[in-house]
Amino acid sequence: MKPSRDIQRLLDIMAALRAPESGCPWVLEQTFETIAPYTLEEAYEVVDAIQRGDFIDLKEELGDLLLQVVFHARMAEELNAFDFGEVVAAISGKLIRRHPHVFGEAGALSPDAVKTLWDEIKRDEKAEGVRARAAMGEPAEKLAGVLDGVPVALPALTRSDKLTRKAAKVGFDWPDSAQVMAKVREELDEVAEAAVQGSRAAIEDEIGDLLFAVANLARHFDIDPESALRQANHKFERRFRAVETMLAERGTSPVESNLDDMERLWAEAKTAERANVGA
């Protein structure tokens, strides 16, 4: 089968994979629910390739993510819900609608004005969606609220960031980062109190509050908490591997070492890393 740049070729391949009599058994048994975790995983792999600056991997991962879109669209088409063309039409219409300064008569705008206009258009779209759902008889409790539209499936830190951003837009926010830092300290003290009480449920609850406060603090500095934590994870991996390497050079391993030895090597790895950054 000859590769093609034509998106229709990809749609035809997916249709063949989903063909009831001749398709792939594994592909045929999949549903929106079973494929959703793969969709999230592919999105994360795209981000990982970007952060590593690996364009070969990025090309591959973007293809994998596109496959997820095609897969979901094909299953929706089988249910007569919508097809890939409607997905393309929806996002094309949205982009044109949300950029009147490019495709309409809004004229030249500053980046801040573009953001303000984008938010206004999104609110109008959301209100229209509410009216459409109400016309279809959707229960009132499902109608729009300030925090609506933040997917539950998002990573928890990212979701915390988005929830507090939405709340901040209606004035529910601390005016400066110092107050948020005080809240972080307060939540940390409450974790310590819960630890003294010994209740696992209470400790979990307070750690959740602490993490939420930290995500809020990151937002006040315009830092993506998920990205910050991802970088911290990479840093920990990098330095711990350096410790393992130094131990191996001495003919030993972490299992055979004590904490004091590993902490000394950790400090060496940290110093060497900072020296290389400054070089």
Image (cartoon, grey):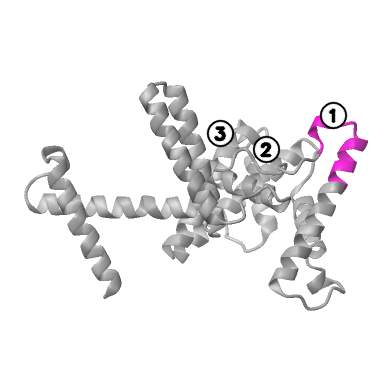
Which residue is under mark 3? 26
Foreground mark, 1 or 2? 1
Q: Which residues are magenta?
A: 128-143
Expressed as whole percent of the image width and height from the top left, the position of residue 202 reads: 46, 25
Is 1 displayed left or right of 16 in the figure?
A: left
Mark before the other along the chain sequence, 1 or 2: 2
Q: Element at badge 2?
A: loop
Front position in the image: 151 or 221: 221
The quarter in which the N terminus is drawn is bottom right
In contact (CB < 8 Å): disc 3 and disc 2: no
Question: In terms of secondary structure, where does tag 3 sit?
Answer: helix
**Horizontal and vertical percent for residue 187?**
47, 38
Q: Nearer the viewer, residue 84 or 130?
A: 130
Label 3, label 2: how many angstroms apart (C-alpha)? Answer: 12 Å
Query: Which one is nearer the viewer's eye here, 172 or 212?
Result: 172
Query: For the residue marked with disc 3, what is the amino acid?
Result: Trp
Q: What residue is drawn where x is 47% and y is 40%?
A: 186
Label 3 or label 1, whichever lies nearer to me, is 1
Q: Is residue 44 visible?
A: no
On screen, residue 22 versus residue 192, left or right, reads right
| Residue type of the residue flagged with mark 1 | Pro
Q: Amino acid at mark 2?
A: Ala
- Residue on which the image places disc 1: 139
For the residues labelled 1 and 2, say whether their Cβ atoms are less than 8 Å apart. Answer: no
Provide the major secondary structure of the magenta segment. helix
Q: Tell me where residue 21 sits by quadrant.
A: top right
